[in-house]
Amino acid sequence: PFPVSIGILPTAVPVTSGEAADADGGALDAYLVSAVGMAVADTLTTPTQDFIATADDGSGAVEVFFSRTGGFVVTGIEPGVTLDVTGLLVPRADGTWRLKPRTQSDVVVR
């Protein structure tokens, strides 16, 4: 047997939705971030059954990506609600980033 140490868990960097959408100019690519107070403007379900909510705190819109394989319950995430989300910034082909929560507990619907 050998000891296994547990390091310090990463702390989410607080960002606005606009900073999340461009990963603060790319400096936060793949970072764990937290964005709060984002109003959902639109939602869609992709052909692969992933769910995307477009949300904005007034600084610019970001897509919040809920993978169908993540087991997310997206009931209640609809235009007009407010989201607080912690997740990873994942790049898109168009030069923007998506905010991808890791677990259901990373999302607060208000």
Image: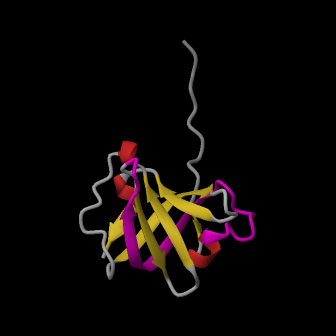
The answer to which of 109 and 3 lies nearer the viewer is 109
- The correct choice, above or below, for 32 with respect to 41 in the image is above
Is 38 magenta? The answer is: yes
The answer to which of 100 and 52 lies nearer the viewer is 52
Is 92 magenta? The answer is: no
Quadrant of the image occupied by residue 85? bottom left
- The correct choice, above or below, for 29 with respect to 6 in the image is below
Which residue occupies 56% across, 62% down? 98
Q: Residue furthest top?
A: 1
Which residue occupies 45% across, 78% down? 38
On the image, the x and y values in percent for residue 96 come to: 65, 65
On the image, the x and y values in percent for residue 99 come to: 53, 62
Q: Residue furthest left?
A: 75
Q: Residue furthest bottom?
A: 58
- The correct choice, above or below, for 31 with respect to 83 in the image is above
On the image, the x and y values in percent for residue 83 come to: 39, 73
What stretch of residues is rendered in magenta? 21-48
How many marks overall?
0
The structure's colour scheme is secondary structure
Which residue occupies 75% across, 70% down? 25
Horizontal placement of 67 versus 25: left or right? left
On the image, the x and y values in percent for residue 9 come to: 56, 48
